[in-house]
């Protein structure tokens, strides 16, 4: 596919995340993409089973699980949904909101919370997921910024229990391994507003699915969310492993019609944290197949 070949020319345009050794070791030449439509047709580029860590995309999963368990209002009473706003933690797609939400996850321990989320993820992707312990061990020893955020949240009564427990929960879920095929299935479930188009299983409520997509659109790509809302126009969340989760509710052009889930992985990220080749692939796809919601 011409779009794939063009996107691959950008793989060396980024560098792997340098602050986590296991990510820094990844070859930027890796490129994988998986698209699945509502009829179960897959479009595959590269190794769609290649594993990488969720990193920031865990924020999407954790937000969904917290909303489904406690109800949306409970979550929104504690975490805002603004791209930037004074007061309570800004939103679930940035670290302050995500760490607050980590403590809302069901369970009385780090293990319980992580196991709950892994079970939820397994139900959507129909595949097992494990923690990359090497990534976890390194991050938990060096995540000083997240600890500082957690102590600030504690000092302002947004974190109602142990700071270390919140940070460990959050970092363990960042270290969960997934693939672009998994992302395609998650994206398709979101496109179906919580009903999985392939199984018709009701996995989450439409209310949770819709606000999740709104947050991905407004806050999913760090400080480039506005730029990509304009140039691509679909709900996306990126992570520093060089992966992007996308969801399309109404594809209009042949071959990419109806509901779609898209996962992309290319470890070379830009200074903002987004995969250079991954974003180029999605941008060209959106332009060629008119995927924008605007
Ligand atoms: N575990 C990373 C952190 O919290 C995730 C960063 C990201 O993917 O944006 O710093």
Image: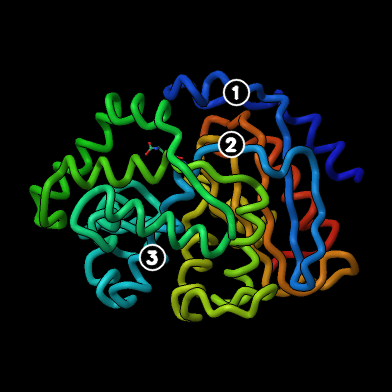
Using the numbered discs, state the Cα–Cα distance from disc 2 to disc 1 in whole angstroms: 10 Å
Q: Nearer the viewer, mark 2 or mark 3?
A: 3
Which disc is residue 242 wearing? Answer: 2
**Displayed-image quarter of ligand 1:** top left
Q: What residue sits 80% from the left and 58% below the top?
A: 42
Left or right: 116 in relation to 278: left
Residue nearest the viewer, comparing 127 with 26: 127
Mark 1 C-beta to ligand 1 under 8 Å? no
* Quadrant of res 85: bottom left
Label 2–label 1 contact, CB within 8 A: yes
Taking 279 as reference, is 22 above or below it?
Answer: above
Q: Position of residue 241 (x, y in %)?
A: 54, 35
Report the colour scheme: rainbow
Dot 2 lies on which element?
loop
Q: Position of residue 46 (x, y in %)?
A: 78, 38
Residue located beneath label 1 in the image: 26
Residue located beneath label 3 in the image: 65
Q: Indicate the quadrant containing the N terminus: top left, top right, bottom left or bottom right.
A: top right
């Amino acid at each position: 596919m011409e779009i794939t070949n063009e996107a691959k020319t950008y793989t060396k345009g980024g560098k792997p995340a340098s602050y986590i050794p296991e990510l820094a070791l990844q070859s930027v030449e890796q490129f994988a993409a998986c698209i699945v439509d509502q009829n179960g047709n897959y479009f595959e580029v590269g190794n769609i089973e290649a594993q990488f860590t969720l990193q920031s995309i865990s924020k999407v999963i954790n937000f969904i699980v917290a909303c489904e368990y406690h109800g949306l209002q409970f979550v929104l009473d504690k975490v805002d949904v603004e791209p930037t706003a004074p007061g309570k933690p800004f939103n679930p797609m940035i670290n302050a909101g995500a760490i607050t939400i980590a403590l809302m996850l069901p369970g009385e321990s780090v293990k319980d919370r992580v196991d709950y989320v892994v079970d939820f993820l397994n139900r959507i992707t129909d595949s097992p997921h494990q923690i990359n312990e090497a990534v976890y061990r390194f991050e938990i020893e060096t995540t000083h910024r997240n600890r500082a955020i957690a102590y600030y949240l504690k000092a302002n009564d947004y974190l109602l229990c142990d700071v270390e427990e919140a940070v460990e929960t959050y970092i363990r879920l960042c270290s969960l391994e997934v693939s672009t095929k998994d992302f395609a299935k998650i994206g398709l479930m979101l496109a179906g507003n919580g009903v999985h188009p392939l199984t018709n299983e009701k996995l989450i409520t439409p209310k949770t699915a819709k606000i999740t997509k709104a947050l991905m659109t407004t806050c999913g790509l760090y400080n480039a969310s506005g730029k990509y809302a304009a140039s691509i126009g679909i709900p996306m969340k990126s992570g520093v492993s060089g992966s992007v989760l996308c969801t399309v509710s109404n594809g209009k052009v042949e071959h990419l019609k109806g509901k779609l889930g898209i996962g992309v992985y290319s470890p070379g990220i830009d200074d903002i944290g987004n995969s250079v080749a991954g974003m180029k692939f999605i941008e060209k796809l959106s332009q060629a197949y008119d995927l924008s919601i605007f």
